[in-house]
Image: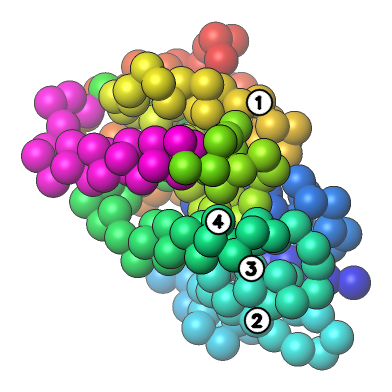
Amino acid sequence: MYQLYIANKNYSSWSLRPWLLMHTLAIPFEEKQVLFQSNDNSVQFKTFAPNAKVPCLHHDNWVVWDSLAIVEYLAERHAGVWPEDNKARSWARSAAAEMHSGCSALRSYCPFHAGGRFDKTPLPDTVLAELKRLEQLWQEGLQRFGGPYLAGTHFTAVDAFYAPVLFRMQSYQLPLASSLLPYFELMMKLPAMQLWYQQALAEPFWDDEHEIAALGSGRLIADHRPGSANSSDVG
C-alpha cells in the first residue's frame, strides 16, 4: 500500500495536493503525518524524504518526492489522475506545472492557513496580478472543456493543484470573479476538501512561526480552531 508523508493540515499546502487527489479518486493509502516543529525540519523530514520536504510517497520500497512527481507516479498506475482527452490532458498538465512553479507573491503574502480568517488588504500589486492570472486560467479551462472542473466533467490532478489557492481565498478573503464562484463552491464542498478542513481545525499543534507568517502585517478576523481566543462557528 502507498504511504503518503504529510505535515500539518492547517499549514501544509503542498501536502494537500496528493492527499486530496488520492482521497477523491479512492486510491488507498496510509497517511503518515509528521508535524512541523519549526521552519527548519530538515533533520526530521530527511528520515523519510531525500529532499527533506513534504509530501513524500513510499511504495513497494520505492520513494517518490515532490507533489508533481507523486502525481505522475500515480498517473502511471491509476486511471483518472489526468483527463483522458489528450488536449485536456496537456492543458491540465501545463496548468498544474504553472501552479507548481508560480504564484510566489501569493504564497509569500498569504501563507497557507486553513483555520484562520485574515484581512490583509490592500493586497500588493504583485498578488493582484497573480490572482488575475489565476482567474484567466480557470476561466479558460472551464470554458474550453465545459466544466464543472477545470479540465472537464471530472475532478483531476489539476484541480488538486489549485486546491490550496481555494483555501487561501477562504482564509484571506481574496477577490474572485463571480463567474468562478460555482467552481469555488464545488471544490470547497468536495468530501475530501471538507475532511481535510475539519482535520486541520482539530489539530492540537500550533506552530508560532507559521502563525506569525500568516498574520504578517494583516489583521486576524477569526480563528475557527477550537480553543482559539478568536474561535467561531461560522464556516
Identify residue type, mark 4.
Ala
Q: Quadrant of the N terminus?
A: bottom right
Q: Which label is found at residue 223?
A: none
Specify start and end residues of the magenta stretch as a single range: 120-143
Q: Between 140 and 70, which is closer to the camera in this rendering?
A: 140
Q: Quadrant of the C terminus?
A: top right
Q: Nearer the viewer, mark 1 or mark 4?
A: 4
In the rendered view, would you say 45 is above or below 129?
below
Identify residue type, mark 3.
Val
SS class, disc 4: helix
Apparent side of residue 71 relative to residue 10 in the rendered image (left or right): right
Q: Nearer the viewer, mark 4 or mark 2?
A: 4
Q: Earlier in the sequence, mark 4 or mark 3?
A: 3
* Residue indicated by mark 4: 88
Identify residue type, mark 2.
Val
Q: Which label is found at residue 189?
A: 1
Q: CA distance from mark 2 to mark 3?
A: 10 Å
- Residue 141 is one of the magenta-drawn residues: yes
Q: Earlier in the sequence, mark 1 or mark 3?
A: 3
In the rendered view, would you say 85 is above or below 187?
below
Q: Residue at x 65, y 81 (%)?
A: 64
Residue 217 in which image quadrant? top left
10 Å crowding of disc 1: few (<14), some (14-19), many (20+): few
SS class, disc 2: strand
Q: Which label is found at residue 71?
A: 3
* Residue indicated by mark 2: 64
Q: Residue at x 76, y 46 (%)?
A: 24
* Dominant secondary structure of the residues highlighted in magenta in the image: helix
